[in-house]
């Protein structure tokens, strides 16, 4: 948790950017996995954390924009809670830690919300992303369940995006920590890799390293010899000589700021020549995008830099042919990189995605492309100082997609489908780093993590 001044200051900015009414913030609850008391890992809502810092179950908060008053909403723990879960400070003591001087029991929240609505005062809330949020909002407002999503406050959403998009120095310190733990997860995974082991053995090392950093995973681990499946969460394959391992995983620091790192390495101690050729194209794409990072450039243009590097590299290998500019316009590189080049990151690994992807990544007047690859680009607008984002080009050989395009006769003048048959068991390569946009360029979040061919191989020497 930051000092109370941080939260007071954040709320002051928020209050100044909105007109009138009540702001309602829902914290998260425990969720049962297979029965009520056997719960999933608890994760507090990120916007609640951003403005109120309290990493506790079952809280809410309200701000009255007219009076400026603020309340933490929750119930004091009972003796049963003390017996089973241990003692806790009073709700007021917790509220004071984040600069809030008033508390309300949960039972009073409904009266307060319905009372405000009855006198024509707006109640602003953010988009619900859990069924429990929709249900609570329905109970608190009396509005039909089906109406809740339509009555989200766009004004509130935009005010939060306008604040959370720009990371402060104290947030960057937390993001450096998250990436440094994520780096250790990758180093341990690469060093633990050995032909004959199963993927889940490496996954265990990775998860344990995240926990050892004091926090936990920032998102479910992606680790597979089938890296061509972009979000592969199946970990039952045996590692065999000649294959690549793609690992996309990161930790949250104790503060919940996230790291999101991908590295790709061989099951064997060294890359094969064929693996080196493809790996180097992705590394060049990663470095070319990083070179271009600065305020004012659009992330759409950065995506196109990645696509261009991939297309040029594959043309050099004889897998593509023809004019590179035409290929970019038509979206041919999507056959090999069918995802976006990156996204904002912060308290969420895909930062603020619950508030609306297009509101975060696209400015007014920009329309998201419907082309494969570009349709998954979460950040397309001009970069600004203070943004933290991922740079994650990739190159994949997805036999099903290649065969579909081939059978449809798609882009025959650009794609050498016959030569691609030799790559059907290749898998995929992705290299992902996290960067802060500065006033005149960009700076890496965390310490550098090995990523050249020589650096990766040296880890196994
Ligand atoms: N970890 C998922 C992603 O890279 O977006
Ligand atoms: Mn990732
Ligand atoms: Mn990512």
Image (tube, helix red, strand yellow):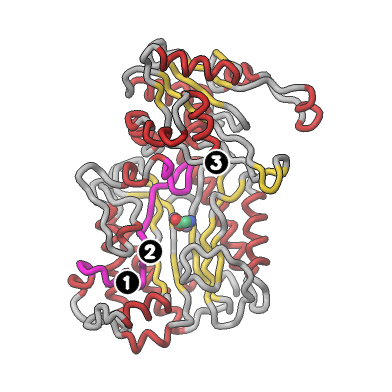
- Chief secondary structure of the magenta span? loop
Mark 2 vs mark 3, CA separation in Å:
25 Å
On the image, the x and y values in percent for residue 361 come to 32, 47
Asked whether the viewer can see residue 457, the reply is no
- Against 364, residue 444 (above or below) is below
Q: Which mark is residue 393?
A: 2
Q: For mark 3, what is the residue?
A: 256
Q: Residue at x 45, y 43 (%)?
A: 346
- Against 382, residue 8 (above or below) is above
Q: Which of the two discs, 3 and 1, labels the residue nearer the N terminus?
A: 3
Sort mark 1 into few (<14), some (14-19) or many (20+) by Cα contacts within 10 Å: many
Q: Residue at x 43, y 33 (%)?
A: 148
On the image, the x and y values in percent for residue 458 come to 55, 72
Residue 411 falls in image quadrant: bottom left
Sort mark 2 into few (<14), some (14-19) or many (20+) by Cα contacts within 10 Å: many
Q: For mark 1, what is the residue?
A: 310
- Against 291, residue 177 (above or below) is above
Q: Are marks 2 and 1 in contact (CB under 8 Å)?
A: yes
What secondary structure is found at the residue carrying circle 1?
helix
Query: Does the magenta portion include 17?
Result: no
Residue 84 falls in image quadrant: top right
Nearer to me, 266 or 325: 325
Asked whether the viewer can see residue 341, the reply is yes
Query: Does the magenta portion include 352?
Result: yes
In the image, taking residue 322 as reference, residue 215 lies left or right, namely: right
* The residue carrying mark 1 has its beta carbon less than 8 Å from ligand 1: no
What is the span of residues highlighted in magenta in the rendered image?
328-354
Q: Which of the two discs, 2 and 1, labels the residue nearer the N terminus?
A: 1
């Amino acid at each position: 948790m930051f000092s109370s001044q941080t939260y007071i200051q954040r709320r002051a900015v928020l209050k100044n950017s909105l007109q009138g009414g009540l702001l309602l913030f829902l914290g998260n609850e425990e969720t049962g996995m297979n029965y009520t008391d056997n719960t999933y890992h608890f994760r507090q809502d990120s916007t609640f954390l951003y403005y109120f810092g309290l990493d506790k179950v079952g809280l809410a908060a309200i701000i009255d924009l007219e009076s400026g008053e603020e309340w933490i909403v929750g119930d004091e723990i009972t003796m049963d809670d003390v017996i089973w879960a241990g003692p806790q400070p009073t709700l007021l003591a917790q509220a004071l830690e984040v600069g809030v001087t008033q508390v309300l029991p949960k039972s009073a929240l409904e009266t307060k919300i319905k009372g405000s609505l009855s006198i024509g005062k707006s109640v602003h809330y953010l988009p619900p992303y859990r069924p429990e949020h929709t249900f609570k909002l329905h109970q608190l407002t009396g509005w039909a369940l089906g109406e809740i999503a339509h009555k989200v406050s766009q004004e509130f959403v935009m005010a939060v995006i306008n604040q959370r998009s720009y990371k402060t120095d104290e947030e960057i310190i937390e993001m450096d920590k998250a990436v440094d733990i994520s780096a250790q997860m990758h180093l341990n995974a690469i060093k633990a890799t050995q032909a004959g082991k199963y993927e889940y053995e490496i996954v265990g090392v990775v998860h344990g390293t995240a926990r050892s950093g004091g926090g936990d995973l920032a998102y479910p681990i992606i680790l597979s010899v089938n890296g061509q499946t972009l979000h592969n969460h199946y970990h039952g394959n045996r590692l065999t000589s000649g294959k690549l391992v793609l690992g996309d995983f990161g930790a949250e620091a104790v503060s919940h700021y996230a790291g999101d790192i991908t590295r790709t390495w061989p099951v064997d101690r060294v890359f094969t020549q064929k693996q080196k050729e493809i790996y180097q194209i992705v590394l060049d794409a990663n470095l070319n995008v990083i070179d271009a990072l600065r305020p004012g450039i659009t992330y759409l243009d950065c995506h196109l830099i990645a696509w261009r590097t991939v297309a040029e590299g594959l043309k050099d290998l004889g897998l593509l042919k023809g004019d590179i500019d035409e290929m970019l316009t038509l979206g041919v590189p999507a056959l090999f990189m069918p995802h976006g080049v990156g996204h904002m990151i912060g308290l969420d690994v895909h930062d603020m995605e619950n508030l609306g992807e297009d509101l975060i990544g696209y400015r007014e007047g920009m329309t998201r492309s419907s082309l494969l690859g570009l349709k998954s680009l979460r950040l397309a607008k001009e970069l600004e100082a203070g943004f933290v984002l991922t740079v994650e080009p990739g190159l994949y050989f997805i036999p099903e997609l290649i065969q579909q395009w081939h059978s449809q006769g798609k882009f025959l003048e650009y794609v050498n489908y016959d030569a691609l048959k030799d790559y059907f068991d290749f898998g995929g390569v992705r290299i992902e780093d996290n960067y802060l946009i500065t006033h005149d360029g960009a700076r890496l979040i965390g310490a550098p993590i090995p990523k050249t061919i020589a650096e990766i191989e040296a880890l196994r020497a």
